[in-house]
């Protein structure tokens, strides 16, 4: 080994140690725990009790493991042995798979079992009998699911690009990722029913309904589609298009993973990846059906869509313009993304490194994606006497956000990135001598976009994949700012979810915010206010209404008689009855008219208040006509007895006078008769 190589090795080791120190200084690195039987990707190192992850080595390993030959062989076997994987009856109510389709299912299952050491096999789900294999992750529940899908049924043709390559992509990914420990659940899916209708993926729609029914929470879905057609003469003919959509405008829901995939393609592949917005092409796919219910998904397909061969008899695996390099790049990139996501449990800040040579005026550019506002730490080293310029560039604006120039063989950049999205590290040899260089950079990541780094979420025991780990309606970062527990839907254990407590203004940390003797959870059930002792403002506390008087603490007037519960209780009335004394007169009427609502006979005259009111007597006076006779025994309680007796006496005198007159008349008449 010559002196120059020894010096280069020494510089590389020094940079590696410097990186570990930089991570420790920045607070990024933490000790790691032991892992299970499945291996962590090689490149994970421990320096002085600190943990870092060599993502470059991980990505290179995944890329090298993904096999173009394997993809070609799988596609050939499937399409030559089991062409026309159709349904004999395409009536959704009477589905009958053809024998070729059934045999293809068995072949796919045997292949998967072989790739996973007999640990993983497919099962049928939904009326379309789609194939689903679930590899459970090692992370704490609830774990997110990442779905990787292809389509196994086809039209009445070989279906190499129309469906076969998507099956090969799913199986190849299962093989490549098999030895990696995953902290999320991986759903490998081969859709049946995708080709029953021309415009709709009925099998995909049914699978989404199955996920919804089983409450499977997905982080994202990678839906492989046609990937073989490769011809530069067509617009985008040599590219892979990514289509993503989310009703949530959060960057992490729409663009973070596509940006990462573009970054990986440009660094380790052929730069064939592009993100496009024409979602119509993906209408017959599982990704499209995921979008309809608000689940993030990425449609992964060839850039030129459709192509001259798919859905025809010419759709064989060995077409002239079919290339298995393209699906290799697609599968390798998705596998790298999964490996990156799998590092969260032990990773504090994955780093990437590059090495190469730069002649004077030469530039080397390296992309990376920022997913959280945090420090990006870059170290650049070179061995020859020359001057280097290192810049960090925001990709969207093209702005240089940080730059340094040094001539002493080492540049360190520590840039606080405030914007998420693609960035570049550009290094330029502005000196007079060529040199070898070593570039390292590290950054924190935030998979779910809650502004909490994955490492911090690991320490909090929250999910790095979900904005709201406990699904209580409040995002993790918001709960951290409030001081509540982002891993418990009910931080204080009072029976009221944190979201309810936040929206009602009650304390997420106190079981009885208003100290009225009723827990906030019980108040939620009762419908009372957790921040008011007397919810309805009737003068009686919620506790007394609930436990003592059994009135409604949300209504001032429980019995609806027009008198507040507090008033009725204060004056001994029954707040649960509109007529306390049962005299058929409401308490309100009696109060307004000066009657006693506690007695059916206010004046004690023997007549009920209701009777006296009905017959226009005074219910507050025993002798309505003031004649000395109580209403109860007065023959006419409306009139004084004198007013009754005087007319009777006059009538008697008149009658006596009449009688006397008649008697005198009779006497005079008889006397006249005797004289005659």
Image (cartoon, rainbow, N blue to C red):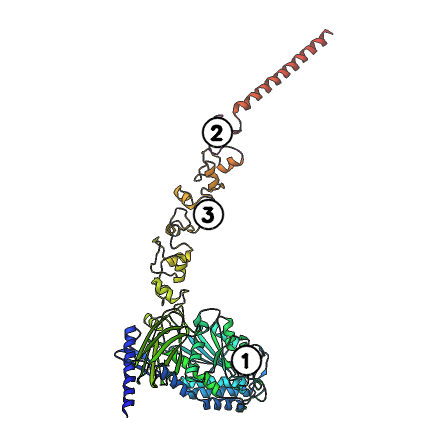
Judged by its main secondary structure, the magenta piece is loop
Residue 29 x/y as whole percent: 30, 75
The answer, for residue 121, to whether it is visible in the render is: no
Residue that carries the numbered disc 2 in the rendered image: 623
**Front tag of 3 and 2:** 3
Label 1 residue SS: loop
The answer, for residue 660, to whether it is visible in the render is: yes
Instruction: Measure the alpha-carbon separation of dots 1 and 3.
Output: 61 Å
* Quarter where residue 456 is shown: bottom left
- Specify the segment rendered in magenta: 615-634
**Front tag of 1 and 2:** 1
Quarter of the N terminus within the rendering: bottom left
Q: Nearer the viewer, residue 338 or 364?
A: 364
Q: Earlier in the sequence, mark 3 or mark 2?
A: 3
Residue that carries the numbered disc 1 in the rendered image: 194
Q: Residue at x 40, y 42 (%)?
A: 572
Instruction: Measure the alpha-carbon separation of dots 1 and 2.
Output: 94 Å
- Does residue 206 belong to the magenta stretch? no
Task: Judge whether 403 appears above or below 671 on screen.
Answer: below
Task: Judge whether 385 appears above or below 483 on screen.
Answer: below
Residue that carries the numbered disc 3 in the rendered image: 559
Instruction: Measure the alpha-carbon separation of dots 3 and 2.
Output: 34 Å
Q: Earlier in the sequence, mark 1 or mark 2?
A: 1
Q: Residues within 10 Å of mark 2 (few under 14, many from 20)?
A: many
Q: Is residue 142 left or right of residue 298?
A: left
Q: Nearer the viewer, residue 437 or 349?
A: 437
């Amino acid at each position: 080994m010559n002196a120059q190589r020894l010096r280069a090795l020494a510089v590389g080791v020094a940079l590696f140690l410097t990186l570990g120190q930089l991570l420790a200084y920045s607070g990024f690195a933490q000790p790691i725990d032991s892992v299970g039987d499945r291996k962590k990707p090689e490149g994970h190192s421990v320096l002085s009790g600190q943990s870092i992850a060599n993502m470059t080595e991980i990505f290179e390993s995944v890329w090298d493991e993904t096999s173009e030959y394997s993809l070609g062989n799988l596609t050939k076997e499937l399409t030559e042995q089991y062409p026309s994987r159709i349904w004999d009856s395409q009536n959704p109510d009477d589905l009958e798979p053809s024998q070729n389709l059934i045999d293809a299912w068995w072949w796919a299952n045997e292949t998967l079992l072989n790739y996973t050491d007999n640990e993983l096999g497919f099962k049928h789900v939904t009326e379309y009998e789609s194939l689903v294999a679930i590899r459970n992750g090692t992370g704490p529940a609830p774990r997110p699911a990442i779905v990787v899908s292809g389509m196994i049924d086809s039209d009445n043709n070989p279906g190499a690009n129309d469906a076969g390559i998507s099956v090969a992509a799913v199986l190849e990914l299962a093989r490549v990722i098999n030895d990696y420990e995953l902290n999320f659940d991986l759903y490998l899916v081969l859709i049946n029913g995708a080709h029953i209708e021309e415009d709709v993926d009925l099998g995909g729609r049914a699978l989404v309904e199955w996920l919804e029914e089983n409450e499977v929470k997905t982080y994202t879905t990678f839906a492989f589609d046609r990937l073989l057609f490769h011809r530069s003469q067509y617009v985008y003919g040599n590219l892979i298009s990514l289509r993503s959509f989310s009703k949530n405008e959060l960057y992490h829901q729409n663009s973070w993973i596509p940006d990462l995939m573009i970054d990986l393609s440009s660094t380790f592949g052929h730069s064939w990846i592009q993100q496009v917005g024409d979602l119509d092409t993906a209408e017959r796919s599982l990704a499209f059906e995921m979008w309809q219910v608000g689940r993030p998904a990425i449609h992964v397909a060839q850039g030129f869509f459709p192509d001259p061969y798919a859905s025809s008899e010419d759709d064989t695996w060995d077409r002239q313009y079919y290339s298995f390099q393209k699906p290799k790049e697609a599968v390798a990139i998705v596998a790298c993304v999964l490996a990156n996501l799998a590092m969260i449990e032990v990773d504090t800040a994955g780093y990437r490194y590059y090495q190469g040579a730069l002649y004077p005026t030469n530039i080397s550019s390296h992309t990376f994606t920022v997913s959280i506002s945090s420090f990006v730490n870059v170290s650049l080293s070179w061995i020859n006497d020359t001057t280097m310029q290192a810049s960090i560039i925001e990709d969207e604006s093209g702005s240089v956000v940080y730059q340094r120039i040094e001539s002493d063989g080492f540049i360190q950049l520590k840039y606080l990135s405030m914007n998420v999205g693609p960035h570049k590290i550009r290094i330029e040899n502005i000196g007079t001598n060529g040199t070898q260089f070593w570039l390292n950079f590290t950054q924190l990541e935030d998979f779910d976009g809650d502004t909490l780094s994955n490492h911090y979420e690991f320490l909090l025991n929250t999910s790095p994949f979900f904005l709201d780990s406990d699904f209580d309606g409040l995002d993790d970062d918001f709960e951290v700012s409030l001081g509540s527990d982002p891993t418990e839907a009910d931080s204080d254990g009072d029976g009221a979810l944190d979201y309810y407590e936040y929206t009602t203004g009650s304390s997420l940390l106190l079981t009885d915010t208003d100290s009225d003797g009723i827990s906030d959870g019980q108040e939620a059930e009762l419908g009372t206010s957790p921040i008011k002792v007397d919810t309805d403002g009737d003068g009686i506390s919620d506790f007394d209404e609930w436990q003592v008087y059994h009135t409604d603490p949300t209504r001032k007037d429980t019995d609806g008689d027009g008198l507040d519960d507090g008033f009725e209780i204060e004056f001994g009335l029954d707040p649960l009855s509109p007529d306390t004394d049962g005299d058929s007169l409401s308490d309100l009427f009696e109060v307004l008219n000066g009657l006693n609502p506690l007695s059916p006979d206010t004046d004690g005259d023997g007549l009920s208040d209701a009777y006296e009111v009905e017959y226009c007597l005074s219910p507050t006076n025993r002798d309505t006509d003031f004649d000395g006779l109580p209403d109860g025994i007065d023959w006419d309680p409306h009139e004084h007895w004198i007013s009754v007796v005087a007319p009777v006496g006059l009538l008697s005198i008149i009658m006596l006078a009449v009688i006397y007159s008649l008697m005198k008349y009779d006497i005079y008449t008889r006397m006249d008769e005797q004289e005659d």
